Amino acid sequence: MFKVLRVIFLGISMLLLTLSGFAEEVSKEQIKGLDEQVQEIKTDVLGIAAELSLLEEKLLYPSHTQVAVFLSLAEKEDFRLDSIEIRMDDKPVAHHLYSFKELEALRKGGVQRIHTDNIRTGEHDLQVILLGKTRGGADFTRMENFLIQKGVGPLFVEISLAHQSISMKNW
């Protein structure tokens, strides 16, 4: 009798172990399927976020009133840019402190969009203030004023830094 119970108990145990192994295989497949679905949803959400960002920019900055200010740095420039401040019509509109990685990106030809705004057509005063250090470690400050002319369409302004001087051009 004891042997029969032992055999029955062993048989039931084997059956339960087999079923739990089968359940694990099904759940692994289900988890893999769920993981793929989650990745697809993440991709969709990122795409929607990018589209929303573009729509938001179009709504906030219509092309007929838009002005965008970009910053570029001459390649192999020997001074270290610490910060920049942009003022438009005597109002501060942008300020940025630079990290080492950002400076390296600018030195390699990168361009930074530092400010986007809506302005009316006509003349506007654009003031650029730089703080940094020369190659020898001395502090330097540069300030330049530019007069920009905003027409009916969008205006793109590039502030170029080269040899510790500031220049501007419209695109």
Image: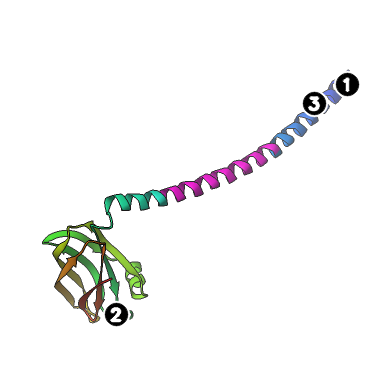
- Label 1 neighbourhood size at 10 Å, few (<14), some (14-19), many (20+)? few
Specify the amino acid type for callout 1. Answer: Val
Q: Residues within 10 Å of mark 2 (few under 14, many from 20)?
A: some
Instruction: Tell me the mark number nearer the camera, choosing from 1 and 3.
Output: 3
Tell me the quarter of the picture where residue 143 sits. bottom left
- What range is drawn magenta here? 26-49
State yes or no: residue 37 in magenta: yes
92, above or below 36, in the image: below
Q: Are marks 1 and 3 in contact (CB under 8 Å)?
A: no
Quadrant of the rendered image containing residue 154: bottom left
3 w.r.t. 74: above or below: above
Location of mark 1 (residue)? 4
What amino acid type should be assigned to the residue bearing mark 3?
A: Ile
Residue 1: percent from the left, percent from the top?
89, 17
Residue 43: x %, y % from top left? 50, 49
Q: In this view of the protein, which residue sits in the foreground, 153 or 143?
A: 153
Q: Earlier in the sequence, mark 2 or mark 3?
A: 3
* Nearest to the observer: residue 59 or residue 103: 59
Residue located at (20% from left, 76% from top)? 166
Residue at the disc numbered 2: 77
The residue beneath circle 3 is 12
Question: Residue drawn at (14%, 73%), measured in percent from left and top?
Answer: 144
Magenta segment main secondary structure: helix
Q: Residue 12, position in %: x, y?
A: 80, 26
Three-letter code for the amino acid on which mark 2 is drawn: Glu
